[in-house]
């Protein structure tokens, strides 16, 4: 311990510092002490042979549902943390739509306490914008931030009242707290269960038009322009037109950031065929042109982060009529290979693919994570870039199995995950590839 | 991705069913109709049970399936489920599994949720006949409508069938669209923009006024307009709807001389269909009801084969 730790001979991919090359990374007291092409092993140091592996800053997920307190049958902070580190994530932001809702400092403290007990990854709570997520009364943003919340959001529900939303943006300015928004005009989504279009029409499923999302993005960008110093973060962007609006707002210098979920840039509504409830989520899977726009948004920087919207549900929530199934899929254990696939396909440069899982999301919320500069926390994810594996939900660390990627082949897999110089995950490996 | 239209002997929908398969089923229906007429019915399903599982209210479809099963010699287990609002999903699958475990030869399932027939078919080994699932399909209705038109015309090739009304919420429209097109007809959907399913213009012609297609039509199939849709602003009033989409006597007079009028029932007389047209010489409404029985006999025979 006192001798520290040396990650030796791996290919370091650190987008924040523009590094892509073989580097040794020395860790002392849980922090990065030195990064260089070749470092001597300090006496007593533990050496981690990273040759043939990629060394990434620990991944950051701005959007997970850990279900605790209240729905521990689906996930707990412990099982969610296990899923996170197995997927290479060392920092996750836990959504407040628990039971009770995280709309008061006591709930925030409970989440942090459970995360400490789990002792695996950093679990950063998100507080609610409105009490009980009802969209009516604002929570105490300052008290939530003091208790440890890193953003506020009513995720899972929109703030339907423009008036309340405007006040939330205004109030948040005092604390520099990002306001994360689930953009959905409920009068437009109106009971829809998949994206509007020919497929929904054929299947006889009620469609959700793109305007349900886009109109709300437009509304909030207009208000952001009026409210100085607020920070808006658009959750799970799914539509081409939303990307366009956000791109334009950023060109004009508005303080807006945005994230996209792996399922939205990997799948279209074709996955719903056969009434597969594992393809039901909100926002819904969209069309080819939306997938193309989301990828373009990641490439040109309009979209800052890949965030999983990890949403565990039990078998009984999904083994029902499509129109009655719960929304959401688990994502922590498949996000990395799905994002790396964008680099392999030539959609993103490799460093950019790593950035949207590390420095990109960290910057959205101003988190001191997502890079391996000297002095940074030694959160490290080691990846075998060539390992091919088949998604088997039964083998997930998550308590839930609701993935639309079951049986699909992935390339690239997390081998080890370290948080502050402590190994929190190691996968048994079949053999090393050079 | 392939369309699962029938799992084995199940009949889940008409989309993706080939023309020969449709023609075979309709030919069997014609034979059953003949046998009913000349008193040569054989109880091919004697000693077997068909379960009618209606999770949504229905009178004519349920009665029609019941008569069809009994004419084939089967016993009918009528299961009327009243699912609880919170756990209808579990109840539905559990109920389907339980009834199938009784040893019935086929399940006839109607449900308010699209995809339910397929969900049931995946859960049990017994063939499932979709008697209407949400706004997805109502295959036996599509078959009986095709049967009724074939009986009249011999072939559907080159004929124009206008399906007019609340297409968005109509499983009858979808099943007819698929079957009639497969059988060679030109199908034109006619609905207000609020009640036209998104993207269907990629499948067939679509119109937003009955007058635009009336004179082209060899058949006009009116769909029931549910007046409760007004609460969701799908249309402002029955009058506004009827002015563009109602088949009035004046409109019927402008149709081709031998063109026919159909309706799956129940009719809102005076809204989508004028009483004098419903009861007039163009109307095939009662033939549709009568033909439902031999068509469903053919469907049940295929399921239980």
Image: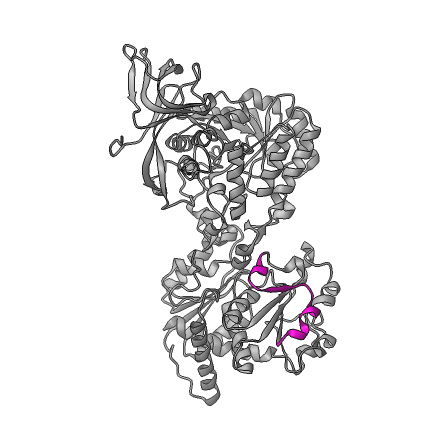
Which quarter of the figure has residue B59? bottom right
Magenta stretch: includes residue B217: yes
Percent from the top left, x then y, of residue B52?
Answer: 46, 68
Q: Is residue A283 visible?
A: yes
**Residue B188 place in picture, x, y as percent:** 61, 68
Residue B238 drawn above or below residue B43 = above
> Is residue A183 among what the camera can see?
no
Q: Residue furthest left?
A: A431
Relative vertical location of residue B102 with respect to residue A151 in this rendering, above or below: below
Which residue is more in the foreground, A73 or A220?
A: A220
Which residue shows up at 37% across the image and 78% down it? B46
**x, y percentage for residue A172?**
64, 25
Q: Is residue B121 above or below residue B41?
A: above
Q: Is A158 on the left or on the right of B252, as rendered?
A: left
Determine if the magenta segment contains residue A313.
Answer: no
Total marks in image:
0
- In the figure, residue A45 lies in which quadrant? top left
Relative to B260, A32 lies left or right: left
Q: Residue at x 55, y 67 (%)?
A: B177
Which image quarter is the C terminus of chain B in? Answer: bottom left
Give how far across and how far down residue A151 sits, in percent. 56, 27
Type of colouring: one colour
Check the picture and name the quadrant holding the N terminus of chain B. bottom left
Depth check: B191 or B134 in front? B191
Q: Nearer the viewer, residue B273 or B111?
A: B273
Residue ranking furthest to the bottom: B38
| The residue stretch that appears in magenta | B199-218
Can you say whether A315 is above or below B110 in the image? above
């Amino acid at each position: 311990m006192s001798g520290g730790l040396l990650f030796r001979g791996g290919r370091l991919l650190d987008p924040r510092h523009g590094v892509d090359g073989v580097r040794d990374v020395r860790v002392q007291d849980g922090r990065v002490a030195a990064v260089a092409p070749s470092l001597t092993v300090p006496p007593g140091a533990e050496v981690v042979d990273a040759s043939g592996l990629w060394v990434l800053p620990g991944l950051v997920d701005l959007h997970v549902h850990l279900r605790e307190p209240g729905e521990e049958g689906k996930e707990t902070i412990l099982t969610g943390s296990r899923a996170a580190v197995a997927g290479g994530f060392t920092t996750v932001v836990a959504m407040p739509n628990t039971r009770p809702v995280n709309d008061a400092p006591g709930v925030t403290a409970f989440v942090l306490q459970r995360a400490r007990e789990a002792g695996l990854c950093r679990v950063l709570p998100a507080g609610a914008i409105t009490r009980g997520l009802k969209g009516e009364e604002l929570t105490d943003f300052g008290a939530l931030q003091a208790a440890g919340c890193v953003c506020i959001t009513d995720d899972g529900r929109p703030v339907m009242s423009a008036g309340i939303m405007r006040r939330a943006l205004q109030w948040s300015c005092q604390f520099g707290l990002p306001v994360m928004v689930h953009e959905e005009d409920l009068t437009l989504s109106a009971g829809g269960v998949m994206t509007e279009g020919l497929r929904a029409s054929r299947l006889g499923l009620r469609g959700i038009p793109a305007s349900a999302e886009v109109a709300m993005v437009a509304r909030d960008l207009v208000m952001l322009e009026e409210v100085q110093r607020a920070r808006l973060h658009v959750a799970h962007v799914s539509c081409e037109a939303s990307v366009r609006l956000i791109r334009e707002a950023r060109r004009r210098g508005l303080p807006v950031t945005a994230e996209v979920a792996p399922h939205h840039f990997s799948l279209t509504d074709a996955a719903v065929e056969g009434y597969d409830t594992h393809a039901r989520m909100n926002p819904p899977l969209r069309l080819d042109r939306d997938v193309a726009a989301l990828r373009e948004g990641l490439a040109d920087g309009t979209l800052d982060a890949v965030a999983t919207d990890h949403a565990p549900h039990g078998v009984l929530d999904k083994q029902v009529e499509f129109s009655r199934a719960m929304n959401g899929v688990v994502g922590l254990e498949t996000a990395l290979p799905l994002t790396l696939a964008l680099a392999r396909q030539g959609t993103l440069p490799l460093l950019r693919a790593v950035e949207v899982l590390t420095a990109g999301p960290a910057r959205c919320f101003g988190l001191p994570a997502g890079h391996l500069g000297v002095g940074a926390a030694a959160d490290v994810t080691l990846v075998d870039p060539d390992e091919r594996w088949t998604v088997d939900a039964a083998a997930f660390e998550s308590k839930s199995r609701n993935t639309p990627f079951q049986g699909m082949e992935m390339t690239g897999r997390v081998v080890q995950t370290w948080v502050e110089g402590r190994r929190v995950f190691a996968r048994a490996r079949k053999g090393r590839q050079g | 991705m392939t369309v699962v239209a029938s799992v084995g002997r199940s009949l889940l929908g008409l989309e993706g069913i080939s023309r020969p398969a449709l023609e075979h089923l309709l030919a069997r229906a014609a034979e059953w109709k003949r046998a009913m007429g000349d008193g040569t019915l054989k109880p091919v399903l004697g000693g077997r049970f068909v379960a009618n599982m209606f999770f949504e209210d229905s009178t004519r479809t349920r009665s029609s399936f019941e008569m069809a099963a009994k004419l084939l010699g089967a016993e009918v287990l009528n299961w009327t489920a009243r699912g609880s609002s919170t756990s209808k999903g579990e109840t539905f699958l559990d109920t389907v599994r339980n009834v199938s475990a009784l040893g019935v030869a086929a399940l006839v399932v109607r449900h308010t949720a699209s995809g339910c027939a397929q969900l049931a078919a995946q859960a049990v080994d017994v063939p499932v006949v979709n008697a209407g699932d949400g706004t997805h399909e109502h295959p036996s209705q599509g078959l009986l409508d095709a049967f009724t038109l074939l009986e009249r015309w011999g072939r559907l090739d080159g004929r124009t069938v206008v399906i007019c009304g609340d297409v968005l919420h109509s499983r009858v429209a979808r099943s007819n669209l698929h079957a009639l097109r497969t059988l060679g007809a030109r199908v034109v959907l006619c609905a207000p923009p609020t009640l036209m399913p998104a993207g269907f213009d990629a499948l067939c012609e679509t119109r937003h006024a009955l007058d635009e297609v009336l004179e082209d039509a060899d058949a006009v199939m009116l769909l029931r307009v549910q007046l409760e849709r007004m609460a969701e602003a799908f249309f402002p009033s029955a009058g506004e709807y009827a002015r563009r989409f109602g088949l009035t006597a004046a409109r019927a007079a402008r149709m081709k001389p031998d063109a026919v009028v159909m309706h799956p029932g129940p009719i809102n007389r005076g809204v989508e269909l004028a009483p004098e047209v419903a009861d007039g010489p163009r109307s095939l409404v009662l033939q549709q009801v009568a033909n439902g029985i031999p068509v469903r006999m053919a469907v049940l025979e295929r399921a239980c084969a």
